Image (cartoon, grey):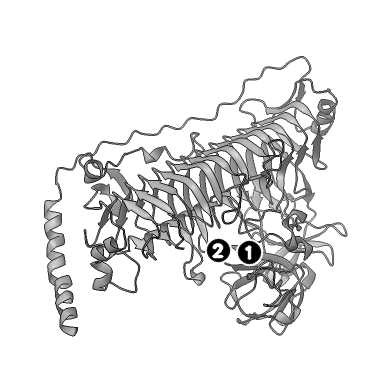
Amino acid sequence: MNFIRFIVSLFMAIIIPFSNLFAMMKKPADAVFTELEEVKKTERVYEEYEAKSNDIILSDGIGLEEAIEEAKNAGGEEITIWLHEGIYNLSGTVTLDGCRNISFKAFPSEKVEITAVKEIGGFTETTVNGVKAWVTDVESGEKFGTLFNGDQKLSVTRYPESGYFFVKEADRSVALFTKENSPWEYTYGDTAFYSKSDIGLDSFYNIEDVQYKLMHYWYCEHSTLTDYKDGRVAFKQPCSMRIEENDRFFFENVFEALNTAGEWYHDTAKNKVYYIPQDGDDISTTVLTAPILNMIFDIKNCENITFSGIKFKNTDWCFSTPDPSNGWLSEYGLVFPQGNLECNGAMEIQKSQGINFKNCDFLNIGNTGIRFNNEDKNCSVVSCTFKEIGCNGIFINGLYTFDENLTTENFEIVDNLIESYGRNFSAGIGILLTRAKNCKLSHNEIHDGYYTAISCGWMWGYADSATDAIEISDNLIYDIGQGWLSDMGGIYTLGIQPNTVLTHNKIYNVAADPNEGGYGGWGIYLDEGSSYITVKQNLVYGCGSDSFHQHYGENNDVTNNIFALSNDGQIRCTRKEDHNELNLTKNIILTNKQPAYSQTVKGKFKDDGNIYWDLANGKHMMSVAGTGTKWKQRIYKAEMKNMGYYNNAVYADPLFRDAENFDFTLADNSPALSEIGFETWNYNTAGTLTNYR
């Protein structure tokens, strides 16, 4: 046996390098590349001003709430509120109930802002933690979780200032459940834990104001403290997921950590606000603002309400409250432990039709940007931007129902820029769609989030689902996860959703929490029960885990994609079931010392006519995951074929122009075209149609 291993090792050391060299010598030097068509983005096109006799015209940020009341009393007659440039500061949430045919439109090219803030001024100088600071009095009982200097969202204090503390163990003596009676294996309803790390403080000043954030798996717990002593941290809101050893956590709104320019602290015990000034701040003229609302518009039972060319900005956030529709979770005061479903929108819409947003901007939103809910139909968000969003960017939140009158359906979410989301609730999602049908999520650019970019479906396993006919196309998704959480995808699906198509998306750099072993930074992730989905002509590369992962599902068609250069592998199919889980055909699978497949055993899925290549080892790519480069993991083609894989496989350089630098332009004489019938597309069309830069 040792002699055989020696011979195989000699073969690997001598023969394979020569065969790779020979393969490189055969590589065409005259590869022909046709340039991809240059994508030309357009500028925003605003509606021309054309007022009707009953329209309302406002100027200088004055009179919006009065105009809304006038429009509400118009009896459904079409009316437009035209807004000249200015900041329209609301005194409370605008409620539209049973209204029809009202439009809110900015004059073309004029800067119109709607917000709801109050000024925080009158500062005097003081010293805090050895640092020069400003302090001012605020009203008794007043609470806000955010502070702004103009459009700059100021940083609340964080402790530690960088890095994390780590959990030693949960204090299960005060948990809601035991292992034996827990309704769900991931939930004990923890309300306290012990820190493994030395927190470095004997106590916190004004502990009721201190918040903790704890990250584990796919969720971030967030609550105020009730007690802290000898490394034991206790808190108000029971955890929705069980706390485990080495979970990371940190604290916010800590007085002892106030020491850096741009930071602030709200002392609710003494009704004071502290601020560390920045360069350019002048104590005699600088006025900060605090939000007074987390919801700007509450729209219900309405038809044909339009918002165009308006910037909505500077709202507050609030802790989510348990939703009664979530069964036992809400009975025990727990919020839903995925995606922050209970986080309300700055624009909250339900039981309405024809609610449309175009050319609007959402900046510094504390909770979710826009949340549509049950029975909403025929709505759209087109050519809008979302920046510095506390939770989800856009949330389409349908009911579990098959009653046509109650379904949430017919949405267009097109040409939007969504960036820097999940800032207050780390599990926030760029575009979240639950239990809806006939929706188009297309040409969006989503990046700089701590969790999934686009999430669709949300019925676990093979239960009947209301999700149907969702098009997720031409989206540009990158820099997602960033090591905060785990179990995420650039695009994530859940449950049965026939007629759903994922196509022409470009996804890269999805990275999970390294303390969870890098678990779950996938490019496209078809999770529990995802079925009857077509995944076609997508470019996915450079992800922390795999380019494509299917947990389990049935008859998904994965065809004509480029899956390349992700760290753990390119294709992962986790669970083996009795039926065919997916059809993997005509894909280009490119590795660089990573495996082509992960966790593969006989009968998980069907592959046919894919092309495989490794940048370092040519056709001798690693077939499955392993601890090294052992020969069984290299020379595995016969074994793979015995298990039913590598059907009609081609092992050849697909001739990308510069894959190592992520240029996946395919040569006109690529064997992918001639030998597997691969169909090219212009992957540069992914992303917004509008120039937002």
Q: Residue at x 74, y 40 (%)?
A: 350
Could you say whether the residue bearing mark 1 is in a helix, strand or loop? strand
Q: Is residue 277 above or below residue 39?
A: below
Residue lying at the far front of the rendered structure? 578
Q: Amino acid at mark 2?
A: Leu
* Residue at (48, 30) in percent of width and height: 42
> Quick check: 49 above or below 494?
above
Q: Earlier in the sequence, mark 2 or mark 1?
A: 1
Q: Position of residue 553 (x, y in %)?
A: 49, 54
Circles 2, 1 touching at the beta carbon (< 8 Å): yes
Please, which residue is most extreme toward the right here? 140
Q: Would you place residue 630 above or below residue 440 in this image?
A: below
For image coordinates 51% across by 70% down, the residue present is: 516
Does any portion of residue 510 appear in the rendered image? no
Q: Quadrant of residue 233?
A: bottom right
Q: Which residue appears at 79% of the width and 49% of the height? A: 292
Q: In the picture provided, is 127 more to the left or to the right than 338?
A: right
Secondary structure, mark 2, is loop
Q: Position of residue 483 (x, y in %)?
A: 51, 64
Horizontal placement of 544 versus 469: left or right?
left
Q: Position of residue 258 (x, y in %)?
A: 68, 68
Q: Which mark is residue 485?
A: 2
**Mark number displayed over residue 220:** 1
Q: Nearer the viewer, residue 573 or 78?
A: 573
Picture mark count = 2
Looking at the rendering, in which quadrant would you find the N terminus? Answer: bottom left
Q: Foreground: 143 or 496? A: 496
Name which residue type carries label 1.
Cys
Q: Is residue 110 above or below residue 602?
A: above
